[in-house]
Amino acid sequence: MEKDRIRVLIAEDSAVWRSALRAMLAGSGEVEVVGEAEDGPKAVAMAVTLRPDVMVVDLRLPGMDGAEVAEAVRGQVATAVVVVSVESTPDDFRRAMRAGARDYLVKPFSAEELLTAIRAAGEGIGDLPATPLPASGALTVVFFGSGGVGKTTLAVNLASWLALRGRKTVLMDLDLEFGVAAVLMGVEPRTSIVDLCRREGEITEDVVWKAVTPGSSGLPGLLAAPPEPHLAAEVDGEARKEPGRPYVSEVISRLRRLCDYLVVDTESTFREATLMALDSAQVIMLVTTAEIPALYRTGRLLDVLLGKLGYPAEKVRLVLNRYDPQRSIKLEQISRGLDHPVSYVIPADEPTIAAAADRGQPFVLKRGRSEAARALVTMGESLAGPVYGQAGTVAESPAEASTRRPAGERQRRGALAPGQAAERRPSVYQRLLSVGRGPGEWVRWLGGGL
């Protein structure tokens, strides 16, 4: 069956550029231009009437500019917006993204660049419902995985994208000994989680918020890791001011009431702080790469998360980072080998990501046209939805759908058998206390050496 063409509405005040855009799209066979508008109010009216899949909108439209058009449209129809402009200032880019644009192209651009942006924007329109925010508190997303797979980079960029879209977002750096989130964000925090653990009495929401380094220019707030490795013991080790007190759980609980989204970057170990974060999460992003050693470690981590810790399979989303389809193992082979679907694929894009890290600026903010940024946005939209406030259930990503095991094949780890009732399990931390194991024994029980 022939794939339906993407219906596109062009909104551009320049007749020359309207003609050029139409010519770029004419030969592709993938796109049908359903209308043209020369100002903002007409563009919105045509979008409501024609309901195109994608709008290509110039940022400097008269009457209503491109960002205002994107914001007006997203509240009325399920149309994705690609903003185009002769300027590429960070402020223009951020304003367009906050208004709901899916992409931002700087003139002049090629026909292939335009088609790529339209394809990406047109994929899954209306098929990515938001993971609903809990009745009270932030949606908590925890990044976990073995070392060296780019976990922190993805956590920083997802949090930045959520903040860019206008939601109150905090990134918690729970890599207590060697956290580098502040470096990737280009900030110098004056406070960290260890300051909260040194206080007497209750840790209130006001106190927690004062320890968060404010975000600016599209960045989330940051609760930084301790400035020195040995200070980690004051958070979840033997140097705690109050021995045995679950400081991490208390801080996460307060942060969830203070923001819309809480993104937590953890260590690559099952230390007490990590277990508390994993327990608190609505979504665990298990990050890996396509190299055999990383996949081997990921398989062991899945065994612990879904087997020994008993988390439901739907809570754990596998993120395949730095993926090159020409050189790497096929997605289907990875999913089959790990017995768990790949939910998100982040393409290999080392020059973009390395340059952003060197500048201390998340790549999702500075390089909106990169393949890695597009994939990151897809991941964010599966959590937050293309339009904030949209109701829905946990979305299944395109990658996850492509690697889902057919019905009748072996049951995934952690999934319930037909007719099996779900058991309400105590939290990991409660289980740790109930069996009286110390940190060393607990790690050995989990399997150790991960």
Image (cartoon, rainbow, N blue to C red):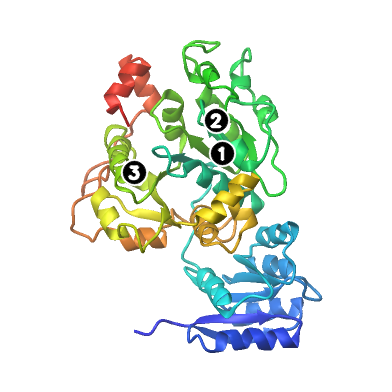
3D distance between C-alphas at marks 3 and 2: 32 Å
Residue 256 at least partly seen: no
Disc 3, SS: helix
Residue in the image at 46% along x and 41% along y: 143
For disc 2, the marked residue is 253
Residue 322: image location, x then y, percent: 43, 53
For the residue carrying disc 1, how many other residues have a C-alpha within 10 Å: few (<14), some (14-19), or many (20+)? some
In this rendering, the label closer to the viewer, 3 or 1: 3
Quarter holding the N terminus is: bottom left
- What kind of element bears circle 2? helix
Query: Alpha-carbon distance for marks 3 and 1?
Result: 34 Å
Q: Residue at x 68, y 33 (%)?
A: 188
Q: Are marks 1 and 2 in contact (CB under 8 Å)?
A: yes
If you read the primary sequence from the N terminus, does the residue marked by circle 1 or circle 2 appear first? 1
The three-letter amino acid code for the residue at tag 1 is: Gly
> Residue 137, labelled with which disc?
1
Residue identifier under label 3: 294
**Cα–Cα span, label 1 and label 2:** 8 Å
- The amino acid beneath tag 2 is Ser
Q: Residue at x 37, y 27 (%)?
A: 428
Mark found first going from the N terminus, 3 or 2:
2
